[in-house]
Image (spheres, grey):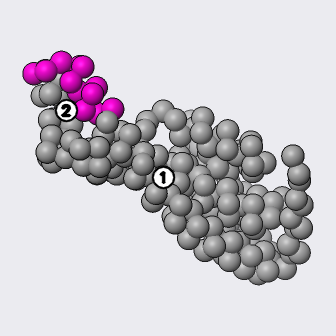
Amino acid sequence: MSPPELPPLSATEPPAAPAHSWFRRRVLDPFLSLLKAGLSPEKLALTMSLGVAFGLVPTFGVTTVISAAVALRLRLNVAAMQLAAHLMSAFQLALLIPFLRGGAIIMGQGDKVAHLTVKSIRYLIHREGWGAAGKLLWRAELGALLIWVVAAIPLVTVIYFVLRAVFRRVLAKQGQEMPETVEVQS
């Protein structure tokens, strides 16, 4: 059985547009559609910058809950914040051990985690049990969260101002009016 024949392209039909990249389809286009849907550049920039910061929190399993709660409280776009936060997963994983090392140094256990690795954590659990590993990681985690809070403030500020300018420029380039930001008092 031969495959069905495709109809010939007419001379007036434009060639098919090239497929967009994964980054364009999954990251840029959703944010541009939010701008087109009436989300102000300021709100979208705040959503994105907070999403990036929450995506880097050095604790697994809290990103979704924290970012959704903050988005709802500040009346930001929950889906956009979740997207921004979860795009940071690889960076969160890469920064986890450095955050824990720094946190342990702040909390007075720097000598115990100078060369902290997954292998050394497994060894500690095997040698001294879960209690010792939990105690070490708990204090290191508290210090890591402190470092994250201190680092997140300038990070959110810089990303906000950069993205606000970018989103304003994108709206101007598309020839659309910027949506007015409405202040809602609680």
Q: Residue furthest left?
A: 127
Point out residue 130 in the picture as x, y percentages from the top left corner. Answer: 23, 19
Q: In this view, does 53 lie to the left or right of 81?
A: left
Is label 2 in a helix, a strand or a loop? helix
Q: Residue at point 75% right, 61% down?
A: 43
Question: In the picture shown, does residue 161 fall above or below 155?
Answer: below
Residue 134 part of the magenta-drawn span? yes
Crowdedness of circle 2 by 10 Å Cα count: few (<14), some, many (20+)?
Answer: some
Q: Residue at point 81% right, 60% down?
A: 39
Question: In the picture shown, does residue 1 fall above or below 100?
Answer: above
Mark 1 to mark 2 CA distance (whole Å): 25 Å
Q: In which quarter of the image is residue 48?
A: bottom right
Nearer to us of marks 1 and 2 is 1
Is label 1 in a helix, a strand or a loop? helix
Point out residue 28 in the picture as x, y percentages from the top left corner. Answer: 63, 62
Q: Residue at point 46% right, 57% down?
A: 150
What is the number of the mark on residue 149? 1
Please tell me which of labels 1 and 2 falls first in the chain.
2
Point out residue 54 in the picture as x, y percentages from the top left corner. Answer: 54, 48
Q: How many marks?
A: 2
Residue 33 in view in this figure: no
Q: Which amino acid does label 2 sit on?
A: Ile
Q: What residue type is labelled 1?
A: Val
Query: Mark 1 near mark 2, Cβ–Cβ under 8 Å?
Result: no
Q: Give the range drawn in magenta.
A: 127-138
Viewer-proximal residue, 40 or 2? 40
What predominant SS class does the magenta segment belong to?
helix
Q: Is residue 124 left or right of residue 143?
A: left
Instruction: Name the residue beneath numbered marker 2.
Output: 121
Q: Residue at point 70% right, 46% down?
A: 71
